[in-house]
Image: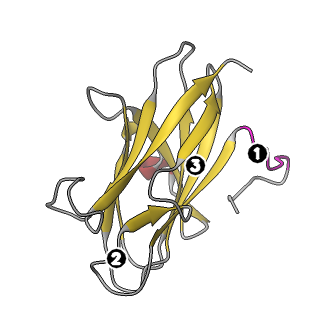
Amino acid sequence: MLVLEPDQTFDPVLDHVVVVGRDGPGRDAPVVLNGSRNPLMVWKAGARHRVRFINITPNDIFVASLTTADAPVDWRPLTKDGAPLPAADASARPATQTIAVGETYDFEYEAPAGRRGRWINVRTPGRQVGGAGARGCSLGVRPSNA
């Protein structure tokens, strides 16, 4: 499900898809990531990862970010809706992206060595994650040395 160059192949250890949806009809249904309210991924530490975000909700705009406990990390945008980005738009930047209905974005992230966890946070603009799950969801990213 990621956009790959002709010489690249999908690697489930390094290539990740995050589908943003709702757990039921209506705007008050909890936000889910890959169908779960409490998802967890294991990413290989010290490796370059590709992640694709897909917003499959019928009428929601979300802000997605990849963070440590302190702040967003940096990632490099690769594609939008399957089309490679121009070089000027594909430089490393803080890992935060607004994603509208039906949009997809691919990013590259260099996971550092070590055991520090990361979180993918997806929330509606202007609201904090928490309380009723209708506003957002977080996905834990646990590092692995394997």
Nearer mark to the viewer, of 3 and 2: 2
* Label pair 1/3, CB-CB below 8 angstroms: no
Q: Secondary structure at mark 1?
A: loop
Q: Nearer the viewer, mark 1 or mark 3?
A: 1
Q: Does 96 appear in magenta?
A: no
- Indicate the secondary structure of the residue bearing disc 2: loop
State the separation of the CA atoms marked 1 and 2. 29 Å
Q: Earlier in the sequence, mark 1 or mark 3?
A: 1
- Name the image quarter holding the N terminus: bottom right
Q: Which mark is residue 12?
A: 1
Q: Name the residue located 57 percent from the left edge and 25 percent from the top edge.
A: 143
Magenta segment, principal secondary structure?
loop
The Cα–Cα distance between marks 1 and 3, rounded to whole angstroms, is 11 Å
Question: Percent x, y for residue 34?
Answer: 56, 61
Identified by mark 3, the residue type is Val
**How busy is the neighbourhood of tag 1: few (under 14 within 10 Å), some, or many (20 plus)?**
few
Start and end of the magenta stretch?
Answer: 7-13
Residue 79 image offset from top left, x and y in percent: 55, 59
Check disc 2 and give the amino acid type: Ala
Residue 29's disc is 2
Where residue 45 is drawn, which disc sits there? none
Q: Residue at x 46, y 19 (%)?
A: 116
Q: Is residue 141 left or right of residue 42?
A: left
Task: Indicate the secondary structure of the residue bearing disc 3.
Answer: strand
Q: Are marks 1 and 2 in contact (CB under 8 Å)?
A: no
Query: Residue 51's mark?
Result: 3
- Give whichever of discs 3 and 2 has the lower sequence position: 2
What amino acid type is highlighted by mark number 1? Pro
Relative image position of residue 126 (x, y in whole percent):
14, 61
